[in-house]
Image (cartoon, rainbow, N blue to C red):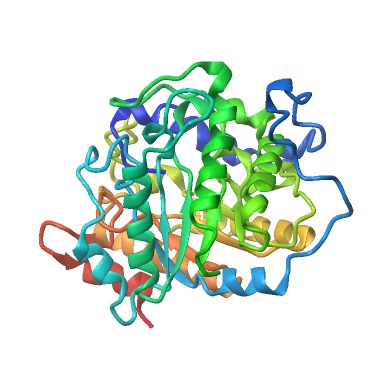
């Protein structure tokens, strides 16, 4: 997720319409096998993980997920078409916040690699951009936190319209570029310690609904070439909704872990968002008993599916846009925090310093009430 111009958020309403379907009749679980199409000959260079019996997550992977604790997304920064295009950069002052007592134990770093790579199937990543991401990762790790580094907003990969400032590529190269970029990213960061986690892709949806299981497996094998024991994160289709976890096929890899995103009740968390067409009306309160059930039902589903798959899971995104009434926004944040933590779920709030942010970059100060609701004792 990102707070972006309206052209970049097309389809967001459909995301949450679909996300709720599985809670009733289990519609999204239908057809959980055989989702991937026949292998594309062009992908022969990137074979999937070899099939084998299901395995449970390793102790190390479980420990690394638990170490995420309470985290934050550095959103609207490196996942913009270019850094600064969405009015935020990774500034020194933001990195300095991470070291403050009682704030975060982890940072999720969304990155749009696709717009900083050659448009051919090689997808050669710009060395200057790689160096920029490398510097940010090193500086965050130096603050003694875990870092989840992902691939974010490769619009053609999902089949979405391009954002302003985003380059189009040959459709035949789209999947190959995804895998080629991961080969480069994995090799570059292979020497980093275990506090760095790789998240294969943010919120797969659209054209990936029928391709994700296959491409996830191929990307994981690419990563394992250079990072045999790195903790790798994968989420389901339907924008990482827990409702789609039954559709996720897990390769037999003990260091693969799960993530979900959670923005229900959506008409509350996204009210007044100016990138949606039409915008959702303002004035929606939180948190009624019905709304709380929406929130906890998806969390309970994530816990059940994680247990079935024998994998740890964390909530990689949740949050409420700042057009909600302040008291309701605080009630939402505290309820979600308590609901996640009572279920043993680490979490990462969306996000630091934009419309969902816990930090007011104009004043140069935390939004104290929101910070207390999320990160207080």
Which residue is found at the position 38% from the left and 23% from the top?
162
> For this rendering, which residue is in front, 197 or 129?
129
Q: Is residue 301 above or below residue 103?
A: above
Rendering coords of residue 24 (x, y %) = 69, 43
- Taking 126 as reference, is 66 left or right? right
> For this rendering, which residue is in front, 348 or 251?
251
* Quadrant in the picture for residue 179: top right
How many numbered marks appear? 0
Which residue is found at the position 73% from the left and 28% from the top?
44
Residue 13 visible, this angle: yes
- Taking 226 as reference, is 214 left or right? right
Q: Is residue 160 above or below residue 235?
A: above
Rendering coords of residue 136 (x, y %) = 33, 59
Residue farthest toward the right in the current orientation of the protein: 53
Which residue is found at the position 45% from the left and 34% from the top?
124
Rendering coords of residue 260 (x, y %) = 57, 52
> For this rendering, which residue is in front, 166 or 137?
137
> Quarter holding the C terminus?
bottom left
Residue farthest toward the left in the current orientation of the protein: 363
> For this rendering, which residue is in front, 315 or 55?
55
Which residue is found at the position 71% from the left and 74% from the top?
59
- Taking 270 as reference, is 220 left or right? right
Residue 201 visible, this angle: no
> Quarter holding the N terminus?
top left
* Quadrant in the picture for residue 80: top left
Rendering coords of residue 127 (x, y %) = 36, 43
């Amino acid at each position: 997720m990102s707070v972006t111009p309206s052209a970049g958020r097309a389809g967001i309403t459909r995301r949450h319409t679909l996300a709720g379907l599985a809670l009733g009749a289990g519609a999204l679980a239908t057809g959980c096998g055989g989702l991937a199409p026949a292998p594309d000959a062009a992908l022969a260079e990137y074979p999937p993980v070899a099939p084998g019996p299901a395995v449970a997550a390793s102790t190390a992977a479980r420990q690394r997920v638990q170490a995420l604790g309470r985290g934050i997304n550095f959103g609207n920064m490196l996942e913009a078409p270019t850094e600064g295009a969405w009015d935020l950069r990774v500034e020194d002052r933001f990195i300095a916040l991470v070291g403050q007592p009682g704030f975060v134990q982890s940072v999720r770093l969304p990155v749009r690699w696709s717009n900083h790579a050659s448009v051919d199937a090689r997808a050669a990543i710009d060395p200057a951009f790689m160096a920029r991401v490398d510097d940010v990762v090193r500086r965050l790790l130096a603050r003694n936190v875990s870092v989840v580094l992902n691939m974010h907003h490769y619009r053609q990969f999902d089949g979405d319209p391009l954002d302003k400032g985003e380059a189009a590529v040959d459709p035949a190269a789209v999947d190959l570029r995804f895998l080629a970029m991961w080969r480069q990213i994995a090799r570059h960061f292979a020497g980093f310690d275990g506090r760095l986690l790789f998240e294969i892709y943010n919120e797969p949806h659209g054209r990936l609904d029928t391709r994700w299981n296959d491409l996830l497996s191929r990307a994981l094998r690419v990563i394992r070439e250079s990072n045999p024991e790195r903790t790798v994160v994968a989420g389901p289709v339907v924008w990482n909704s827990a409702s789609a976890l039954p559709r996720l096929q897990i390769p037999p890899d003990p260091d693969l872990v799960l993530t979900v995103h959670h923005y229900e009740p959506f008409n509350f968390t996204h009210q007044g968002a100016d990138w949606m067409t039409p915008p959702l009306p303002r004035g929606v309160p939180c948190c009624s008993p019905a709304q709380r059930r929406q929130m906890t039902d998806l969390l309970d589903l994530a816990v059940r599916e994680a247990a079935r798959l024998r994998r740890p899971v964390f909530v990689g995104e949740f949050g409420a846009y700042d057009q909600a009434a302040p008291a309701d926004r605080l009630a939402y944040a505290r309820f979600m925090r308590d609901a996640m933590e009572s279920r043993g779920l680490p979490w990462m709030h969306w996000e630091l310093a934009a419309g969902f942010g816990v930090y007011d970059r104009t004043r140069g100060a935390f939004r104290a009430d929101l910070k207390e609701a999320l990160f207080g004792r």
